Amino acid sequence: MLTAAALPSFKQCTRCGSTWIDCTDFLSDPSVNLRAYQVSFEELEAGIFLFDHSCRASLSIAVGDFSHLSDGPVFEERAVGTDECPGYCLKRTNFDRCPVRCECAYIREVLQIIKIWPKNAG
Ligand SMILES: [Zn+2]
């Protein structure tokens, strides 16, 4: 019999101990819901996605663990702080796509993908 520790896991819930083997397993789980995005302007990949688990725990996972989901363009320039920037990244519960050619925009794309990810039935 395998112990939980012997299995590779993507994420473990600190409260109820549920484990998810990979990103797909995690996002397909109907008991997991995207709650917020906490931007890290210093290092975008170190930003945090916050999820609610059905046990009422809040799970935080680094943006870098999901950024492979987007195959869209990544712009080099940042528009943060300019007139163009709608400031979505500063609103933790805003998951809208960003229309601006900005380095931070690909994460908005990842947010969309997470949001519409099909959930397993039951
Ligand atoms: Zn849990």
Image: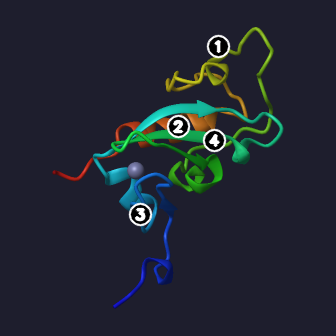
Question: Which residue is rendered at x = 58% and y = 33% of the image?
Answer: 37
Task: Assign a secondary structure to mark 1.
Answer: loop
Between the C-alphas of marks 2 and 3, the distance is: 23 Å
Q: Which residue lies furthest to the front in this view?
A: 15
Between the C-alphas of marks 1 and 2, the distance is: 15 Å
Q: Sequence-wise, which precedes: disc 4 or disc 3?
A: 3
Residue 21, image quadrant = bottom left
Task: Say if 12 sits above or below 115 in the image.
Answer: below
Q: How crowded is mark 1: few (under 14 residues within 10 Å), some or many (20 or more)?
A: some
Residue 110 lies, in percent from the top left, at 52, 42
Within 8 Å of ligand 1, the CB of disc 4? no
Task: Assign a secondary structure to mark 2.
Answer: helix
Q: For residue 109, which numbered disc appears in the image?
A: 2
Between the C-alphas of marks 1 and 3, the distance is: 34 Å
Horizontal placement of 45 versus 96: left or right? Answer: right
Q: Name the residue under label 1.
A: 86
